[in-house]
Image (spheres, rainbow, N blue to C red):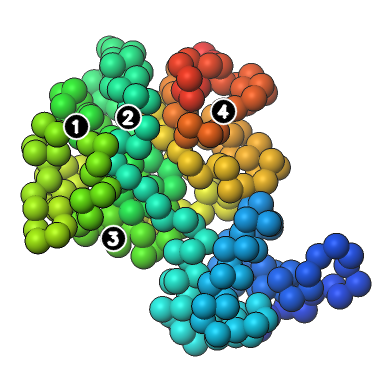
Amino acid sequence: MDMNRIFPELPRANQAETGVDPDYLEFIQGIKKSTGIDLAQYKEAQMKRRLTTLRNKNGYTKFTDFYTAMMGNKSLFYEFLDKMTINVSEFWRNPNRWEVLRDEALPELSAGRPKLRVWSAACSTGEEPYTLSMILADSGLLGGTYLLATDIDEGALAKAQEGLYLERSLKDVPKEVAERYFTAEGQMFRFDAKLKKAVTFKKQNLLLDTFEEGFDLIVCRNVMIYFTEEAKQVLYHKFAGALRPGGILFVGSTEQIFSPSQYGLEPAETFFYRKKA
């Protein structure tokens, strides 16, 4: 990676702008210009607190100095991405919601359809799309499914493609499912190679990039809570546009969509929203 290309000269913030820390403002302007990641679309208090911790840990007192350091330090840049994207995930997180997907949503979505298009958006280190692959496999649907998984963090995607996890990530996986699809390797557990190959991983910026379309199911859980209300509205419109009529958006347990009709969606089950036909 050419860090000089990724991090051009840092743009100067408007020092007269009130209510904004000019040091942090310059930092987010530089990140947007150099990477396309718009930190202004994330809740400022949460994001700034998280990045201040990272900055201080690496021995910098100013965001502008931290930015300059990232220009020539690829590992520091990847550490920034990892901190920014909160790569904390587990298999079968909130198990009862996955059971609803398996027992109610998937039978409805697959009825009369020879193939499914499924997308795990902001997939982090792979636990979510691999949970989908296990459920689809046990439902006899994986062979005819296009299963896409995307994330902005290349480091997280690399970990996902490696498919090696700590035991704590498997704590909610039903025992018989874990025995079928995981193999112990020392203190780690390796995910089934055949199911891993069924997932197509791609790098993607949700706020910036164009989405593929015609999905039967989009899963985006425990990510929207970090975005501003304006960014959420943009994303819900984009997700709705990426679903086929009757397709379902599955969100996290803290991400209930208020007034889903403004996005052309309607409630299906709790945290499941169907695109209107």
Closest to the observer: 59 or 14?
A: 59
Report if the CB atoms under discs 1 and 3 are less than 8 Å apart: no
State left or right for residue 91 relative to residue 37. left
Where is mark 1, residue-wise?
174
Where 46 sits versus 258, above or below? below
Tell me how far mark 2 sits from mark 4, CA to CA: 17 Å
Tell me how far mark 2 sits from mark 3, CA to CA: 23 Å
Disc ID at residue 159: 3
Q: Position of residue 54 (x, y in %)?
A: 53, 72
User: Quarter-wise, where is residue 194 in the image?
Assistant: top left
Q: Earlier in the sequence, mark 1 or mark 2?
A: 2
Tell me how far mark 1 sits from mark 3, CA to CA: 23 Å
State left or right for residue 221 relative to residue 56. left
Foreground tag (2 vs 3): 2
Element marked by disc 3? helix
Element marked by disc 2? helix
Where 9 sits versus 221, above or below? below
Tell me how far mark 1 sits from mark 4, CA to CA: 26 Å
Q: Position of residue 73 (x, y in %)?
A: 46, 84
Where is mark 2, residue-wise?
95
Report if the CB atoms under discs 1 and 2 are less than 8 Å apart: yes
User: Quarter-wise, where is residue 125 in the image?
Assistant: bottom left
Q: Quadrant of the N terminus?
A: bottom left
Q: Earlier in the sequence, mark 1 or mark 3?
A: 3
Check disc 4 and give the amino acid type: Gln
Q: Earlier in the sequence, mark 2 or mark 3?
A: 2
Foreground tag (2 vs 4): 2
Q: Residue at x 67, y 81 (%)?
A: 62
User: Quarter-wise, where is residue 133 in the image?
Assistant: top left
Where is mark 4, residue-wise?
256
Res 81 seen here:
yes
